[in-house]
Amino acid sequence: MKKTLFAIAILNFIVVAGFAQQNLPAANYEQAVKFLAGNTSKLVYNSNVNPNWLPDGKFWYSTNTASGNQYVLINPADGSRKTATDLKSLVPDAAERPMGMGRRGGGLEVLSPDGKKAVFIKDWNLWVKDVASKQETQLTTDGIKDFGYATDNAGWRHSERPVVLWSPDSKKIATFQQDQRHVSDMYLVSTNVGTPKLEAWKYPLPVDKEIIKIQRIIIEVDNRKVIRLQMPADARRGTLCDDIACSGAFDDNEWSPDGSKLAFVSSSRDHKEAILRIADATTGQVKTIFEEKVATQFESGQGSVNWRFLPASNEILWYSERDDWGHLYLYDATTGKLKQQITKGEFVITRLLKVDEKNRMLYFLANGREKGRDPYFSHFYRVDFGGKTVQLLTPEDGNHNVTLSPDGKYFTDNYSKPDVAPVSVLRDMNGSLIATLEKADLSKLVASGWKAPEPITVKSRDSKWDLYGLMFTPTNLDKSKKYPVINYIYPGPQGGGVGSRSFSASRSDHQALAELGFVVVVIDGTCNPGRSKSFHDVCYGNMGDNTLEDQISGLKQLAAKYPFLDLDRVGMWGHSGGGYATAAAMFRYPDFYKVGISESGNHENRNYEDDWGERYIGLLVKDAQGKTNYDNQANQNFAANLKGKLMLAHGGMDDNVPPYNTYLVVDALVKANKDFDLVIFPNARHGYGGDSFYMMRKRWDYFVKHLLGAEPPKEFKIKVD
């Protein structure tokens, strides 16, 4: 008996050793490449409509058909259509009309609404150019280095394009003089032959005593008159994201139609206070109308700022999550008193798309109102100012992407699910169907061997909430076998790992990885937006949570349902916030996660721009022992716990998450005498650019070798046709 057991043990050792040494053929990688977006998207026909509206109310769009590109002209009055293989024969002057595009101008200039003027920055001052004559006029004169006008710098995002808001009559500009003289500097150095190039810019950090502040101004363009608003400088903060120019323009500002008044919101450094003010555009006098204070962080919506200034009725539409859901409220603009809550219920308004003041009707996108559907699916609604009737305008089960016509009479709607092909329709603003424009043709995609990801639902760590995600399995899945699991993660808190709930033939390289012999799982954990305030705030103050307990709980539930998931072989990868989460998973749950690939992670948020950390963690404070509230969220402090295989990657010129975030983890791993792998792309930014396919291949190799137990093909080159 002992001899038999010994022989079996030897045989098992040989089998395991042989498995570890098996070579994965290059053909497996070639199969995986077939499922990357560049190869799958061209196999989808008649997918989605991007309307280009014409002055006569009609619109045209182009679509890729099985027989080639086709142009379609639609008359929304009756839904009739004309088609052609060239645009000129259908819309002769289409090239001269960039329909559907705003007048923001290109490059480093911002055009006025009438298209006659363009403002730009030169030598820290704001200038205006007459578009016709090209004549340039200086509007401000006292701008100096780091205290300039309309300058754009959120630390993680910075450009030479001015941040301004033109008045509707093109006569005034709302902007600011930005004081960044007292915040930290960031440095990056290029890698090249000869003297390296130094990049230096202001990059505020949570450890800074001062942050960037803005002194709000209004400029009368023709008179070259600068009017300073009569108020203290504001923190450079916005209500939508960790920037004051999320949309590319000067957010949280609204002009009255005649340009006489400017309404704006001031946000506190920690985002816990939002103050609605109205300024007299002639005198600069400022009146505070009302304010909202919250315990965590205030935000005005998802995807757009949702408050509105309605001077005709002397009202303010306001967005708030005060009842745990994102809803609209109506205020008196003179007294600042609440008139009423307009929308109510367990759903979240994400974007207010249209305000019909004459008929007192609001049109908006919202998540979660339609029961029995994925709560992240977006639908289009309208409601009267009184809030009596909320009408669903897009009834189909799916995620809806809506585009309104300029005259506000119609909208196009592309709806789909991650596993259901897109359909494009035209409706009027009552929701009545006028025409079905396109139905996506997936036949060639399916014939190539493609299959859709499987939507999944699991419970959160405490079983309080349903969590939603996607699972990608090999196209040749054998349910009698065991497959290692790769947990892709982006923990938010400004968005999840799944991304859009609309159909996509490929999402990152998830299906490609699955083809190599893995099951790839993406779960949007708690702490993400688009649902209730309490759901979003689960991780507030502790971004080091990274939804990891939700991920582990979810994977265990899936393994109970799908026995082919092997939870003894679980890996994780993520980029940026996902890189932060991946390293945290390897350090905090080293017995569960065996292999991790951490790309461009913000591992130490005292080394990442101030607005993100201070919004979601809070202001940095020290206790009596000198320990801060950021310490236990810093990955390098837990690096000594590493047991598995970890690859760290970063771009050497990353001006979003500077590479020093990863270097801190590297230093800690070295000091702890831990083995790890490191990939640096010397001149790459945050997304790696031209090096991204190399990183993808390294990612495949790492999981194949250390999670699958096979030897990857040497130096395989990923090519997309």
Image (cartoon, helix red, strand yellow):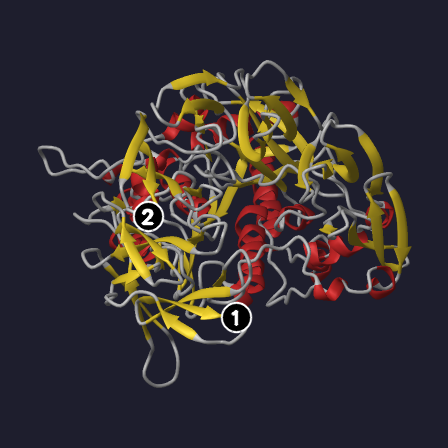
Can you identify the residue that label 2 sits on? Answer: 282
Is 636 on the left or on the right of 558, as rendered? left
Q: Residue furthest bottom?
A: 194
Amino acid, disc 1? Val
Q: Looking at the image, is 304 positioned above or below residue 693?
A: above
Taking the spot 20% from the left edge, 59% from the top edge, the residue there is 181
Can you identify the residue that label 1 sits on? Answer: 131
Quadrant, the N terminus:
top right
Is 641 on the left or on the right of 64, as rendered? left
Q: Looking at the image, is 252 positioned above or below residue 93?
A: above
> Element type at marker 2?
loop
Quadrant, the C terminus:
bottom right
Amino acid, disc 2? Thr
From the viewer's side, name the closer residue of 257 and 513: 257
From the viewer's side, name the closer residue of 336 and 123: 336
Residue 171, given in percent of the width and then of the height, sits at 44, 56
* Residue 62 visible at all: yes
From the viewer's side, name the closer residue of 521 and 673: 521
Residue 91, given in percent of the width and then of the height, sits at 82, 60
Taking the spot 64% from the left edge, 47% from the top edge, the residue there is 507
How far apart are the two marked residues, 1 and 2, measured between alpha carbons? Answer: 26 Å
Q: Residue furthest top?
A: 388
> Element type at marker 1?
loop
